[in-house]
Amino acid sequence: MCGRFARRSTQEVLADWFGVEPEDMPWFAPTHNATPQSTQPVVRLNNETGKREFALMRWGFVPYWAKDAKVGYSTINARSEEVAAKPLYREAFKRRRCLIPADAFYEWQRIDSRTKKPFAFGMQSGAPYAFAGLWERCKPKEGDPLETFTILTTDPNELAEPVHNRMPVILEPHDYTRWMDPGDPTRPPTDLLRPYPAEKMRSWAVSMVGGI
């Protein structure tokens, strides 16, 4: 799974990386420890213009038909092998795919029954990257409309496997457009849901989460 990640890049860097005008972005600060249920920037296609835009959403997917937003506590990740068929994610996978900007994600390696050691995973180049995600808008029984997201996961690559049995789906920049384009909803880009090449990544031990 992916339960923590870092986004160190400035808004200017991310605007250039994702092809969005800086003045059109909502304000958000860098973070070294993005946590579940926090509000994070997500890149999606604008429904009216079809252009990329940043939107602030809560991490923890709440389906449009949910009566209680608490379901988002257990949906920070979605297994990529299940999203096409699972009712919870099926419609979002067809029509509401997004990118979650990051510079590193954290996983914990179990040392013994009492000890886990955190590791960070980033790019060899030091560049930002994007997780494959799904987003949704719902109107809970109580409160304002809510937009939420989940991060898709897949099998680990050779770098992540010694630490954890899952890793986030990381997309190549040239695949961003195809991932977000709704295209034919009966044929979503399932081929992109694969482990990222290990040789393009690096990992390092951290003394505490957020200490990258």
Image (spheres, helix red, strand yellow):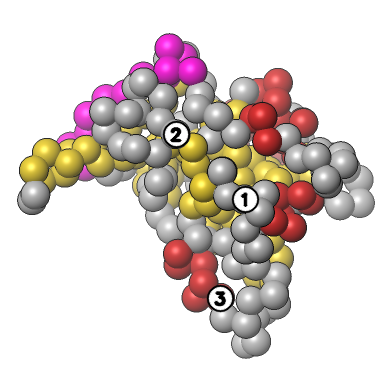
Q: Is residue 151 magenta?
A: no
Q: Amino acid at mark 3?
A: Ala
Nearer the observer, 109 or 155 = 155
Point 49% across, 37% down: residue: 154
Label 2, label 1: how many angstroms apart (C-alpha)? 15 Å
Label 2, label 3: how many angstroms apart (C-alpha)? 28 Å
Q: Nearer the viewer, mark 2 or mark 3?
A: 2
Q: Amino acid at mark 2?
A: Asp
Q: What number is the disc on residue 83?
A: 1
Nearer the observer, 29 or 118 = 118
Q: Amino acid at mark 1?
A: Val
The residue wearing badge 3 is 69
The residue wearing badge 2 is 155
Instruction: Check disc 2 and report its element: helix, strand or loop.
Output: loop
Dot 2 or dot 1: first in sequence order is 1
Q: Is residue 202 magenta?
A: yes
Q: Nearer the viewer, mark 3 or mark 1?
A: 1
Question: Which image quarter: residue 14?
Answer: top right
Point 86% across, 52% down: residue: 47
Nearer the observer, 128 or 114 = 114
